[in-house]
Image: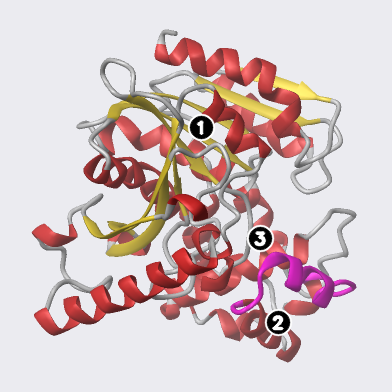
Amino acid sequence: MTSSLGRRTGTVLAAALALSLLGAPTPAAAQTAGGDPGAVVVATPVAPDARPPGVADATYVTYWTTGPMNEPALSTGAVLLPPGEAPPGGWPVVSWAHGTVGIADKCAPTVTGKLVGPYVQHWLDQGYAVVATDYVGLGTPGVHPYLDGPTEAHSVIDMVRAARTVRPSLSNRWVAIGQSQGGHAALVAASMATTYAPDLDFRGTVATGAPSNLENLAPLVGPGFPQLPLTGSTVFVAYALAGLRASRPDLDIDSYLTPLGVDVLNRVESLCYEEAAPQLDGISIGQLMARPLDDPAVLAALRITLGVPVRGYDRPLFIGQGLFDDVVPIPLTWKLTADLTANGQQFVFRTYPTGHLYTMPASLPDTSAFVRSLFGT
């Protein structure tokens, strides 16, 4: 995929330069007609020999969405079509929200080419078009606001709008499917999809391995925070703090960090997860912190970004969780499902005797039937 990706990068850079010269909107500028959510800035077809196997047509897009603080922002993503002719009414759409890859541009799936694994391929094989956002800041200006739920959700929803612009064979019927960070994004998207994008026919959501209730742990984060018996926690916290530091400079996140913490945040801004994990191995969350994250303004910001809504779901919702998940432990999800139940929300909850990533394939018999029912097939 190297040649296609090189062409895409050159096209995006050229478009960005053209937009700058023409005085078109930038992510920090006031929103204009050209910056409407879902508006396409660049669309680059992927050459047939560079497409993933099983993908009949692929297009990279750069599009406008809504970023931190509800400001216009750019995101990138891919539109992937299955083989064959579109059914009557167009291809039903799966908006895929990927898990943690990092917060540097080089980590974006459209940059690495890691767009279609067995799980995504399954949905293509089922006859769905897959649209896959990179999220704001992964391949576009600024630091990716990791686990900023509203921003990620906007990227997931507006990816559908952008995809339908470049491929009119796509239906306006769509579902959100996400794993891990993407499960978090899909849940937040589910709570706002019908109000944020009434022009689309949102049918429902599948979220597996989705982190929740992290905002309730934030007041405990400080110098004495212990090493957790979980995978990747220090990396995830560093990513989240680096994203918040970039999107909310007024919070002065560095003032909460030790010199090691500042160094770690600076480093992870350029490291994908597989690079960051070994570098941060043995470093605890507590070692990053010079003082507790107990300022009301910081905690309020974390509630907005990390929080998963516990009401507002007006379409069917499926939550899948691995019993042996050592990245997103099941007590967090039990708390989420208890809160959803207390608020009268309707959802399907299934557990599987698996770890974090293996929940995706383990849940497929259930989620495949669930998604078919959403599309009425």
Amino acid beneath label 1: Val
Amino acid beneath label 3: Pro
Side of 210 relative to 244 (left or right): right
Earlier-in-chain disc, 2 versus 3: 3
- Secondary structure of residue under mark 2: helix
With respect to residue 183, does 171 lie above or below? above
The picture quadrant where one finds residue 295 is bottom right
Earlier-in-chain disc, 1 versus 2: 2
Q: Which residue is mark 3?
A: 219
Question: Residue 279 appears at what percent x and percent y?
Answer: 81, 77
**Residue at point 67% right, 23% down?**
364
Q: Which residue is mark 1?
A: 310
The picture quadrant where one finds residue 358 is top right
Question: Residue 95 appears at what percent x and percent y?
Answer: 44, 38
With respect to residue 26, does 267 lie above or below? below
Q: Which residue is mark 2?
A: 264
Residue 248 seen in this snapshot: yes
The colour scheme of the drawn protein is secondary structure
Q: Which residues are magenta?
A: 269-285
Question: How far is the residue under mark 2 from the one under mark 3?
Answer: 21 Å
**Residue at point 65% right, 43% down?**
117
